Image (cartoon, rainbow, N blue to C red):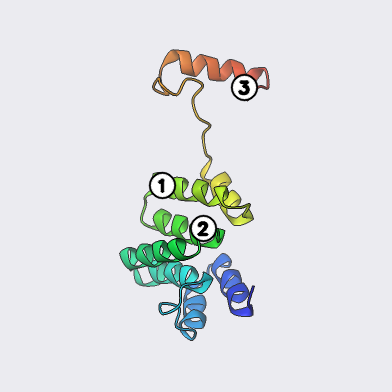
């Protein structure tokens, strides 16, 4: 991983997206499709409110490099900024299909993801799902 990417990720984790944006803009991230592009997209969504443009950049990056988990992490975070939790969770889960990423795992844990109901064809609120889920949890099978 190149030094710019490492530094930008550190700044973003520290909440200093404006500094990360400044650092990333020096490398023309919109013209190249790489990890820089996704990090740049996350920064412009947060600092400039350009969510649609950021989502588009991340999708282009994912199409170019589908196995890079950083693209999914950034896209998921952008969806969270846009208050689209359901879409963010789907993106994070899709990213984990392409590899283990501790940042994605941490995001999912912080969101408090619920497990699928025991009977997916029934609504989560169905008593059969509720009580079966509780029993499975009590017996440590879930």
Could you tell me which quadrant the C terminus lies in? top right
Q: Which residue lies furthest to the bottom in this view?
A: 26
To which residue does mark 3 refer?
137
Q: Where is residue 93 in the image (x, y as percent from the top left)?
A: 51, 46
Circle 3 — which element? helix
Which residue is more in the foreground, 75 or 31? 31
Could you tell me which quadrant the N terminus lies in? bottom right
To which residue does mark 1 refer?
85
Q: Residue sitting at 46 percent across and 57 percent down?
A: 77
Q: Which of marks 2 and 3 is in front?
A: 2
Q: Residue sitting at 63 percent across and 77 percent down?
A: 2
Q: Which of marks 1 and 2 is in front?
A: 2
Q: Which of marks 1 and 3 is nearer the N terminus?
A: 1
Which residue is more in the foreground, 16 or 140? 140
Between the residue at mark 1 and the residue at mark 2, the CA separation in whole angstroms equals 13 Å
Q: Residues within 10 Å of mark 2 (few under 14, many from 20)?
A: many
Between the residue at mark 1 and the residue at mark 3, the CA separation in whole angstroms equals 25 Å
Circle 2 — which element? helix
22 with respect to 123 (left or right): right
- The answer to whether residue 126 is above or below residue 80 is above
Q: Residues within 10 Å of mark 3 (few under 14, many from 20)?
A: few
- The answer to whether residue 22 is above or below residue 52 is below
Q: Earlier in the sequence, mark 2 or mark 3?
A: 2
Q: Position of residue 138 (x, y in %)?
A: 64, 18
* Res 73 label: 2
13 with respect to 62 (left or right): right
Q: Position of residue 34 (x, y in %)?
A: 50, 72
Q: Earlier in the sequence, mark 1 or mark 2?
A: 2
77 with respect to 1 (left or right): left
Q: Position of residue 18 (x, y in %)?
A: 47, 76
Circle 1 — which element? helix
């Amino acid at each position: 991983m190149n030094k710019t990417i490492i530094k930008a990720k550190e700044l973003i984790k520290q909440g200093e997206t404006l500094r990360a944006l400044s650092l990333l803009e020096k490398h023309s991230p919109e013209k190249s499709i790489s990890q820089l592009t996704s990090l740049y997209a996350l920064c412009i969504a947060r600092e400039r409110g350009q969510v649609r443009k950021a989502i588009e950049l991340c999708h282009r990056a994912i199409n170019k490099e589908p196995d890079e988990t950083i693209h999914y992490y950034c896209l998921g975070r952008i969806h969270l900024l846009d208050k689209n939790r359901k879409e963010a969770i789907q993106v994070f889960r899709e990213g984990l299909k392409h590899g283990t990423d501790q940042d994605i795992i941490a995001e999912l844990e912080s969101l408090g993801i619920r497990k699928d109901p025991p009977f997916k064809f029934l609504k989560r609120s169905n008593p059969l799902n509720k009580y079966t889920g509780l029993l499975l949890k009590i017996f440590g099978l879930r």
